[in-house]
Image (cartoon, grey):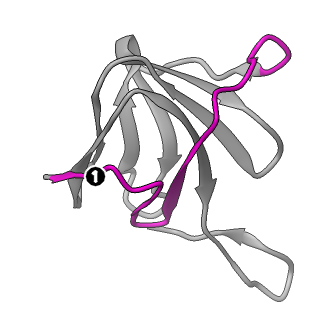
Amino acid sequence: MKKTNNHHIRQGDVGICKTKSRNVAQLTRINAVNGRNILAYGEATGHHHSVVADKTELYQLNAQTMLLRVLDEVELEHQEHAFIVLAPGDYEVHIQVEYDPEGERRVQD
């Protein structure tokens, strides 16, 4: 377990950056899956980076970035990484991309 107050957090190919609170009225909410908000799926393994949905809200900011609103302290989990405790607040979520001759693509777990 890693508990952090840092503003920049990384778990595998998922980068999370604490940000100022935002108005989410114009954002598209991303629906939870089986009680979890999924930040990223591992394409090769089926694993995922996720948080429990009853303590968080997830929104699409733009094509590359999501907004994770943490309502109550929550654990960011992944099957192959230590979990990270996130304090309440708003976080921008970025998925690492890698170069491919056919264009950028998300890093595969």
Using residue 53 as the reference point, say whether residue 68 is left or right of it: right
Q: Name the spot of residue 109 as percent of width and height, x first.
A: 44, 67
Pointer 1 residue: 4
Amino acid found under the numbered disc labelled 1 = Thr
Using residue 50 as the reference point, say whether residue 30 is left or right of it: right
Using residue 83 as the reference point, say whether residue 96 is left or right of it: right
Above/below status of 60 relative to 28: below
Q: Name the spot of residue 40 as percent of width and height, x first.
A: 51, 48
**Pick the front one: 100 or 85:** 85
Q: Name the spot of residue 17 as percent of width and height, x first.
A: 55, 52
Q: Name the spot of residue 35 as percent of width and height, x first.
A: 37, 16
At a point 37% along the width and 59% down the height, the residue shown is: 45
At a point 48% along the width and 35% down the height, the residue shown is: 38
For disc 1, the neighbor class at 10 Å (few under 14, some 14 to 19, many from 20) is few
Extreme residue toward the left, this view: 1
Above/below status of 101 relative to 72: below
Q: Which residues are magenta?
A: 2-27
Above/below status of 13 relative to 65: below
Within the magenta stretch, is there residue 12?
Answer: yes
**Pick the front one: 53 or 55:** 55
Within the magenta stretch, is there residue 42?
Answer: no
At a point 23% along the width and 60% down the height, the residue shown is: 80
Q: Secondary structure at mark 1?
A: loop
**Pick the front one: 66 or 89:** 89
At a point 74% along the width and 84% down the height, the residue shown is: 99
Above/below status of 77 relative to 30: below
